[in-house]
Amino acid sequence: MKLVKRLVLLAVVGLLAAGSLMAGGGRQRQPAASAANEPFQGKIAIITNTVSQNEEEFRSAEQLVAKYGANKIVHVTWPDNFMAEQEQMVTTVARLAADREIRALIINQAVPGTNPAVDRLLESRNDIFIVYCNPQENPPDVSRRANLILNTNDLARGPAIARQAQTQGARVFVHYSFPRHMSNVLLAGRRDAIRETCQRLGIQFVDATAPDPTGDGGLPATQQFILEDVPRMIARYGDNTAFFATNCGMQIPLISRVVEGHAIYPEPCCPSPTHGFPSALGIETEPGQTDVINYMIRETRRIAAANNMTGRLSTWPAPASMTWTNAGAEYAVKWIRGEVPRTGIDESVLAQCVSNYIREFTGANVTADMANYTDASTGVTYNNYKLLIMGHLVF
């Protein structure tokens, strides 16, 4: 229990730090427009997970509220235990559908249960541009409901993660997940791609099962398992072991134990320099602090060096989940204005929306490679399902 209390304390510290981070990012964006010069007609609704499930998703909606104003952006959240409260999800979307001013809906994450909730919306509305971010249901099903789907290119990430681990000196790769995630074709495909690439590279692959954070023990049980199991894995396989976990709530305990055990962490489940690292490493920012992202990166590098971990921690240079929310919303704004086709996706415009946000958030010209999702078993390509991947930032 002492370990759980310590973890909760770290999470609270990280919440304060990341809250300052996201607020700082919001203050750097444009102020809300006046009614006389509306940025777009109507409203955009954004559904995110709660802070406890994924803070970056929650803060990404706050950024858009700061940019456009609460009169233009409606931000609501899924229930914490969404797997057990699917009817509440349906109710949440139904309430949004009843607001005739809402012209677009951004959902991040599109967790299990999103499809039935959106079905209720589509019964009464066909005039809303729907964006799914990081969907947890099968691609053919989400592609029939959403106008645009944004996700990390998990199938391409698999080999990239394994190769990154190799460059960091990994001889063993431990993959933590649970059956619910492994029922998702993209997450399972990524796991399989990691395993296959590890085999080609001569890295031993360990498929480890952790408790589902939506199960009986909740997130504390999952975090406690990671806190206890990672040291066991390091004791068994050595410190040249790379660790990857598929759930956001696992990242803080995983990073903390990897650093303590001098192991390897190629990237988080949701790649970002602010996902897990601030809380796990005790990095804090002051209210009103500027240049927060570069400060976080510098502090992570400093702490890595102080713990003889230089080169053994890495991630993407920009937060994936926040990029998807913001890029999806900016594309939706253009759809509402009539600046992009009513059907189909203008890839060049979408790519610009992605690049603009990454540059605005990080101050760097970072690009993301984009591809359409193709079902490996059927050969069907879904042109509204966009997969993106970035290179690595090594601490």
Image: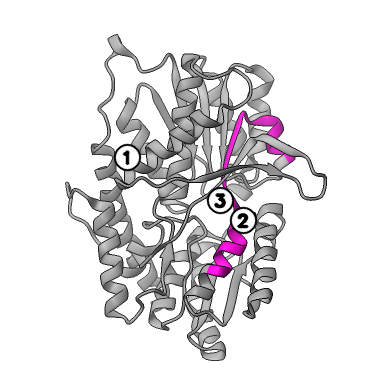
Give the residue number, with chain letter if any, for mark 2: 156
Earlier in the chain: of badge 1 and badge 2, it is 2
Give the residue number, with chain letter if any, for mark 3: 81
**Is residue 144 covered in magenta?**
yes
Helix, strand or loop at label 1? It is helix
* Count of numbered badges drawn on the protein: 3
Question: Which residue ends up furthest to the right in the rendered image?
Answer: 378
Q: Is residue 170 left or right of residue 255?
A: right
Picture quarter containing residue 131? top right
Q: Is residue 155 left or right of residue 253?
A: right
Above or below for 18 versus 24: below
Quadrant of the rendering where the C terminus is positioned: bottom left
Residue 143, given in percent of the width and then of the height, sits at 69, 35
Give the residue number, with chain letter if any, for mark 1: 360
Q: Label 2: how many residues lie within 10 Å, few (<14), some (14-19) or many (20+)?
A: some
Decide if residue 215 is in sight here: no
Residue 124, given in percent of the width and then of the height, sits at 65, 17
Picture quarter containing residue 284? bottom left
Earlier in the chain: of badge 2 and badge 3, it is 3
